[in-house]
Image (cartoon, rainbow, N blue to C red):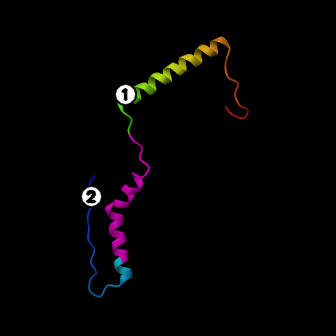
Amino acid sequence: MNKVKFEIKKQDRETNQALIRRFTKRLKNSGILTNAKKNRFRKRVKSSAMRKRAVLRKLELTLEFEKQKKLGFEKPRKPGRR
């Protein structure tokens, strides 16, 4: 991960509010906060074995559902859902 580093020093005759404004502007333009917020809820990437297992399970369940449907054992739907 790229670490953007910057330093803000108070200039001559600069007010504290102006310093804070300059700092926040620099922070916003650097993209540090946006990257931190973006990665906050990032999910881990599943391994290839886990993905294969999930696909196989989904196929199994689909086949089982189709088999049950042909035999007339379809689950009744809840009212109000489509």
Query: Which residue matches tag 2?
Result: 3
What segment carries the magenta color?
20-44
Mark 1 surroundings within 10 Å by alpha-carbon count, few (fewer than 14), some (14 through 19), many (20 or more): few
Residue 77 located within the stretch drawn in magenta: no
Does dot 1 land on a helix, a strand or a loop?
Answer: helix
Amino acid found under the numbered disc labelled 2: Lys
Q: Please name the predominant secondary structure of the magenta segment in the image.
A: helix
At horizontal 44% and vertical 49% (from top left) the residue drawn is 41
In the image, is 56 to the left or to the right of 61?
left
Q: Where is residue 10 shown, x and y percent of the image?
A: 28, 81
Q: Which one is nearer the viewer's eye here, 12 or 74?
A: 74
Q: Position of residue 28 (x, y in %)?
A: 36, 65
Q: Residue at x 26, y 64 (%)?
A: 5
Instruction: Determine whether, in the image, residue 76 is placed left or right of residue 12.
Output: right
Up the image or down, 69 lies above or below 20; here it is above
Q: Secondary structure at mark 2?
A: loop
Q: Which residue is mark 1?
A: 49
The kind of residue on which mark 1 rests is Ala
Work out whether mark 1 precedes mark 2 in sequence or the reverse, and give the earlier one: 2
Task: Determine whether label 1 and label 2 are within 8 Å by CB.
Answer: no
The front one of 43 and 11 is 43
